[in-house]
Amino acid sequence: MPRARWRVIVADDEPAARRGVKQLLQPFPDFTIVGECRDGREVLAALDALQPDVLFLDILMPEVGGFEVIRRRTPERMPAVVFLTAFDQFAIRAFEAEAQDYLVKPVSEARFAATMKRLKTRLSKGSSTGDPSVVVTTPRGRLVVPLREIDWIEAADYYARLWVGARSYLLRESLAALEVRVSAHGFVRAHRSALVRTSAVRELRPNADGELFALLGSGVRIPVSRRRRASFLAAVRAQGA
């Protein structure tokens, strides 16, 4: 039996609707359901806990609806979203929220298959490009920033500030949450408030007091805490810096 490549959460307050999605997904072994949610609060918790690639999301749910889930989470931190609803009047708003597709119940097998084909194409491209990125919001709109261009990331209260040379961008995500996403792409903690891309390190320098600093290609010096020193050095050496 082929191993599933992509993780799915199904969110709908109607058990019959969740069962329907599970049945429709059976012919697509690349996708596996890792969680089911009955309302938006459960969805928000599951997104952090389960890290899905795809979210089938009902629009009208108790307390916290589908659009509110995206507003609270922010579009750039959402997986691929397919709205699943009994109403067709929310379609424009759904695509403004960057939904991958919009399915109106009851969904035919052919219509669902078309959605799955679209999802597979998007996810395959995303996993094969080798150029992961984050999406930030700027006064001119959303901007895709490849991780390979980010020199370091610092904590900024409940945000993270991404540094690309002398430019910086705010991302509405904590440093701890962002670390989970970027640690596999060459980022390591220098101290409690900073993540550094190891390939951006040009030199490691101790000062007269024995404190260690990482000198980046941009000219920025990042202190490396004593607690993080061993793991930081190991990561930089592994990178070959």
Image: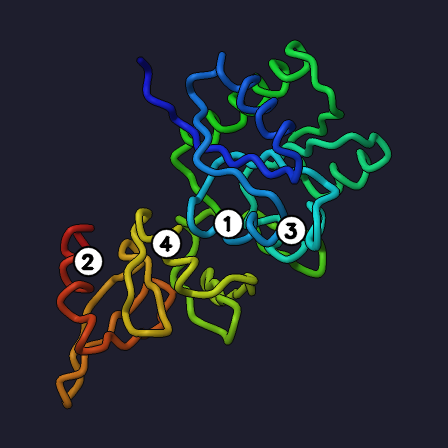
Badge 2 element: helix
Query: Could you give the CA–CA distance between mark 1 and mark 3, rounded to whole angstroms?
Result: 19 Å
Query: Could you give the CA–CA distance between mark 1 and mark 4, rounded to whole angstroms?
Result: 13 Å
Instruction: Classify 10 Å Cα crowding around label 3: few (below 14), some (14-19), many (20 and above).
Output: many
Asked if disc 3 and disc 2 are in contact, CB closer than 8 Å, the reply is no
From the viewer's perspective, is 111 left or right of 182?
Answer: right
Residue under numbered circle 2: 236
Query: Could you give the CA–CA distance between mark 3 and mark 2, rounded to whole angstroms?
Result: 38 Å
Residue under numbered circle 4: 180
Q: Nearer the viewer, residue 105 or 232?
A: 105
Lower position in the chain sequence, tag 3 or tag 2: 3
Query: Could you give the CA–CA distance between mark 3 and mark 4, rounded to whole angstroms?
Result: 21 Å
Lower position in the chain sequence, tag 4 or tag 2: 4
Query: Could you give the CA–CA distance between mark 2 and mark 1, rounded to whole angstroms?
Result: 23 Å
- For badge 3, the amino acid type reads Val
Q: Position of residue 212 (x, y in %)?
A: 19, 77
Lower position in the chain sequence, tag 3 or tag 4: 3
Residue under numbered circle 1: 134
Badge 3 element: helix
From the viewer's perspective, is 108 left or right of 113?
Answer: right
Asked if disc 4 and disc 2 are in contact, CB closer than 8 Å, the reply is no
